[in-house]
Every structure is written in structure tokens, then in C-alpha cells.
């Protein structure tokens, strides 16, 4: 079997590694150099247990959240679900070295156009499109608009400064005046180390909003000013969109969508590194079973994401239906040091309580993946 993988991000690299381990011939195409052009907060949930110790781009585990609404609250999320700060450039470069060692043919600065994809469909048994959103396949097959029907928009900067008081936690600040249709929305400070941090804003945008869309650059500038960071040195700047739901169709002839190209980003926070890695491996498993395997691909992904999606749906519902004051009281109750207060909060929000418990208790790993 001979396959092509488009995009050397997390999904494409994990797909290439999985295929090479099955002795499949792999050509991996990356439009830049591996590790270039990354726009990401680089703080990720390791919901699949694929990150075990610092090194090779893993900077440090995140111990907890500092949440700011009306008040400020701390929650030790790292003790329930592993979070990591990640240097994606180093991490992806290390994965690409592993892939080349296994025989993957890496083609850097080799962007794939629509006309290229037409030719490749005839030259390869399968193509895994991990080119992001919108994907190359979406421009060929006419579904690019599906990515922006409802999506998260983000704008961020990497700042140099003193973040020693926050490490090893991250800070999330909720906006008091954001319309319900733009929820979830908030700002974040993710320290990479004591001297630098990724700082940004994110919110939901809808195609129907038109000129009423939030101005992400202004939101970020206002947040930096409020946080006393307006004068910090900017090391990098970027922005983009993340689809808010998995696409309705993931297989087009012999092309399978992977990662962001499949819409596998969180509707709550826009992250999707672990789901991209999972989809890359599951896509290889699917194509190994031919058309019948490809038909099962979306179902496999949905089963892995069930608990996460359930909790995110409930949380987003709270952010859209509660007033800012009510949401602040919910945060206060959830993070309270008092067991009695947390119990009372759970009684008042039973669906959120049970979906949270299920998410915390669920342990899933990428199938047949060596740690």
C-alpha cells in the first residue's frame, strides 16, 4: 500500500508514524518546514495518555487553573486530567525525525494544491488530509464553508516578561459583556516558562453575524492593557479559526480527513492536538480495512470523544444561558474548598456534575500505540 499524508502537524505526523509501523509506504507533504507557522496556545489536555514526561518539546505539566470572572478562583485540574505546556516546534520536529527513521519520505516546503490533489488521488491508494481548516480536500470537493458555519476565532501573542508568579498554572479570564451567541469566550495566559507566555483571546463566531463579529485584535489589546501586559515585548503574533464540531462527512473517495481538517477541535477551548493524534492513528487503522474500514472511521472517533463532547456541551450551555453573575457563582461553587458548597453546587447542576464525573473517570488511549 502507498499513501500520502498532507500536513506535518500533530495529526499528519501521527498518521505517518502509524502507517510506517505497518510497513506502509508513506509520502508526507508539508507546505513549510516542519514546526514553522504554528499558531497555538500550546497548552493541551493529554486525554489519551500520549505525553508521559518532559523532554522532546514537552515543557512542563500544568498543575491548575486560575479562573477570573467576578472573583478569582483556583482549581487543581492537573490532578484530575493531565495538562502540558508544549513547544510544538520542537515536538513536531522530533516526531518528524522518528518518522524519517521509520522510512517516511518527508517533503518540506511542498504545499499541495487542488490540482495536485487530483493527480495524487490517482497515484496513491489512500490520502490522509491533515492540512488544517479549510483543508485542501474541502476546496476540491466544495465543503470549505462547513468549517465556518460556527467556529472559534482566536488571536494571540507570545510575550516576554515575568510570569514566575503564575507558573506552573495557567490563567483564564472570562468577559463580562460578551453576547451569548459569542460564548464560549475568554482570554488566557499560558506561561511556557517563567520568562515567556502565550497570551490570547478566543470566542465563538458565526457566519450569520456578518459585520457584528467581535474584533479579536481589539479584545486582545484591551485584555493586555487590563492585565498590565501592554508594554511587554511581543515575540510572535498570530490568529485563526477552529471548527466547533466534527464535519458531517470525513471520507471522500480515497481521501480521509484528519485533525482540524475533520473538525476535531474543542468547541469549548479550540484545542485539538490529542484528537488530531488520535484521528491520524485511527485513519491508518481504517484504511487498512479498505472501504469497509473507512466507513467505520467516523464512528470510532465519535466513541472516543463522547464523554468530552458531553461535558463541553453542558459547559457551553451554562456560559450561554447564565448571566455573568450567575456564572461567577457557579465557578465559586465548583472550586470551593468546602465540600458542603461543592455538594450543593452539584445538586443544583446535576447534569454538569455527572458529565464531569464521567469525563474525569474515563481513561482512553490510542489503540496499539507505543507510549
Image: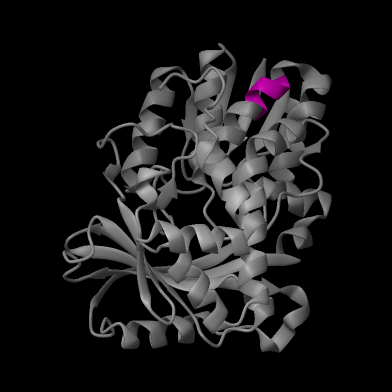
* Secondary structure predominantly adopted by residues drawn in magenta: helix
**Span colored in magenta:** 283-287
Q: Residue 27 sits in which quadrant?
A: top right
* Position of 104 relative to 175 (above/below): above
Give yes or no for residue 100 being in the magenta stretch.
no
User: Where is residue 89 shown, x and y percent of the image?
Assistant: 35, 47
Q: Residue at x 82, y 28 (%)?
A: 295
Viewer-proximal residue among 99 and 202: 202
Q: Residue at x 70, y 34 (%)?
A: 303
Left/right placement of residue 114 relative to residue 343 reads right
Snapshot colouring: one colour
Quadrant (top left, top right, bottom left, bottom right) of the N terminus: top right
- Counting from the top left corner in percent of width and height, residue 102 is at 43, 17
* Residue 297 spot, x, y in % from top left: 74, 30
Q: Is residue 284 magenta?
A: yes
Q: Is residue 124 visible?
A: no
User: How many labels sit on residues?
Assistant: 0
Query: Please, is residue 149 above or below residue 112 in the view?
Result: below
Side of 183 relative to 159 (left or right)? right
Q: Would you identify the image quadrant in which residue 210 lies?
A: bottom right
- What residue sits 28% from the left and 64% below the top? 197
Amino acid at each position: 500500500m502507498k499513501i500520502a499524508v498532507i500536513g506535518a502537524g500533530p495529526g499528519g505526523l501521527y498518521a505517518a508514524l502509524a502507517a510506517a509501523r505497518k510497513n506502509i509506504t508513506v509520502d508526507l507533504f508539508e507546505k513549510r518546514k516542519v514546526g514553522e507557522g504554528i499558531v497555538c496556545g500550546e497548552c493541551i489536555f493529554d486525554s489519551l495518555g500520549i505525553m508521559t514526561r518532559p523532554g522532546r518539546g514537552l515543557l512542563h505539566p500544568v498543575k491548575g487553573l486560575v479562573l477570573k470572572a467576578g472573583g478569582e478562583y483556583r482549581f487543581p485540574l492537573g490532578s484530575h486530567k493531565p495538562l502540558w505546556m508544549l513547544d510544538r516546534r520542537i515536538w513536531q520536529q522530533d516526531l518528524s525525525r522518528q518518522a524519517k527513521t521509520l522510512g517516511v519520505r518527508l517533503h518540506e516546503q511542498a504545499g499541495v494544491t487542488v490540482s495536485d490533489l487530483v493527480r495524487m488521488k490517482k497515484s496513491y491508494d489512500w490520502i490522509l488530509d491533515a492540512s488544517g481548516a479549510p483543508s485542501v480536500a474541502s476546496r476540491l470537493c466544495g465543503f470549505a464553508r462547513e468549517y465556518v458555519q460556527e467556529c472559534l476565532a482566536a488571536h494571540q501573542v507570545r510575550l516576554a516578561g515575568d510570569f514566575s508568579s503564575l507558573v506552573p498554572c495557567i490563567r483564564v479570564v472570562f468577559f463580562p459583556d460578551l453576547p451569548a451567541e459569542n460564548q464560549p469566550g475568554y482570554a488566557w495566559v499560558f506561561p511556557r516558562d517563567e520568562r515567556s507566555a502565550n497570551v490570547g483571546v478566543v470566542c465563538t463566531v458565526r457566519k450569520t453575524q456578518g459585520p457584528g463579529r467581535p474584533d479579536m485584535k481589539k479584545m486582545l489589546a484591551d485584555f493586555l492593557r487590563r492585565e498590565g501586559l501592554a508594554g511587554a515585548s511581543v515575540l510572535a503574533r498570530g490568529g485563526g479559526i477552529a471548527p466547533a464540531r466534527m464535519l458531517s462527512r470525513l471520507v471522500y473517495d480515497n481521501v480521509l480527513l484528519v485533525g482540524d481538517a475533520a473538525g476535531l477541535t474543542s468547541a469549548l477551548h479550540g484545542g485539538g492536538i490529542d484528537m488530531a493524534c488520535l484521528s491520524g492513528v485511527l485513519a491508518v487503522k481504517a484504511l487498512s480495512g479498505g472501504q469497509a474500514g473507512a466507513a467505520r472511521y467516523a464512528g470510532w472517533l465519535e466513541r472516543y470523544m463522547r464523554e468530552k463532547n458531553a461535558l463541553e456541551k453542558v459547559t457551553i450551555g451554562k456560559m450561554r444561558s447564565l448571566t455573568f453573575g450567575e456564572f461567577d457563582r457557579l465557578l465559586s461553587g465548583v472550586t470551593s474548598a468546602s465540600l458542603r458548597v461543592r455538594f450543593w453546587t452539584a445538586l443544583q447542576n446535576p447534569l454538569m456534575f455527572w458529565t464531569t464525573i464521567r469525563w474525569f473517570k474515563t481513561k482512553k488511549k490510542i489503540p496499539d500505540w507505543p507510549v
